Amino acid sequence: MRYDSDDPDERRCRIVAQRAGPLLVEGPVDVTLEDGSTVSSDRFCVALCTCRRSRTYPWCDTSHRTPERLGRPGGAGRMDTGHGAGGEHLG
C-alpha cells in the first residue's frame, strides 16, 4: 500500500473480516501498536489477531481455535470447541 499516493485506488487495501477469526489484510503492512511501536510484514496477505490470545500478537497464530472452557470461573463447565450446533467450524 502506498501512503504517499494521491490516487485513492493505489492507497486502497483489502481487509477480510471473519466472525471468529483474524482480520486478513492484503500486504505488505505496517501495524502501529498501542505503545506506538510499529511492526511490519512484507507478506502478500497477513492475519491480524482479533482475539488477543496470540503469542505473536498482532499476528494471528490460530490461538482462537484453542478450546476455551465456558461456564463457571476457573474453567468448569462445557468446552467451546469452535464448532457450531450443526458441527460447522466457526473459526
Image (cartoon, rainbow, N blue to C red):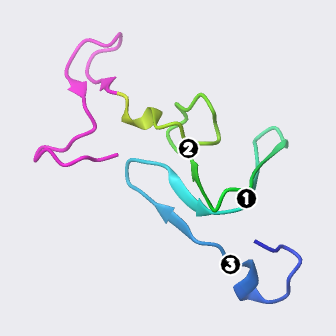
Badge 2: residue crowd in 10 Å (few <14, some 14–19, many ≥20): many
* Residue indicated by mark 1: 29
Q: Which residue is drawn at 46% across and 37% down?
A: 62
Q: Residue at x 52, y 30 (%)?
A: 53
Dot 1 falls on a residue whose secondary structure is: strand
Taking the magenta stretch, the answer to whether it contains residue 20 is no
Q: In which quarter of the image is the N terminus?
A: bottom right
* Residue indicated by mark 2: 49
- Alpha-carbon span between mark 1 and mark 2: 14 Å
Q: In this view, does 1 lie above or below 77?
A: below
Dot 3 falls on a residue whose secondary structure is: loop
Q: Earlier in the sequence, mark 1 or mark 3?
A: 3
- Image coordinates of residue 30 in percent, x first then y, are 77, 55
- The answer to whether 51 appears left or right of 5 in the picture is left
Q: In this view, does 7 lie above or below 15?
A: below
Query: Who is closer to the viewer here, 59 or 52?
Result: 59
Please state which amino acid type lies under the numbered disc 1: Val
* Residue indicated by mark 3: 12
Q: Which stretch did the figure color magenta?
A: 67-91
Q: Residue at x 76, y 41 (%)?
A: 34
Badge 3: residue crowd in 10 Å (few <14, some 14–19, many ≥20): few
- Alpha-carbon span between mark 2 and mark 3: 21 Å
Q: Are marks 2 and 3 in contact (CB under 8 Å)?
A: no
**Magenta segment, principal secondary structure?**
loop
Q: Which of marks 2 and 3 is nearer the N terminus?
A: 3
- Image coordinates of residue 60 in percent, x first then y, are 55, 41
Q: Earlier in the sequence, mark 1 or mark 2?
A: 1
Depth-wise, is mark 1 or mark 2 nearer the camera?
1
Q: Which residue lies furthest to the front in this view?
A: 43
- Image coordinates of residue 83 in percent, x first then y, are 22, 41
Q: Are marks 1 and 2 in contact (CB under 8 Å)?
A: no
Residue 14 in which image quadrant: bottom right
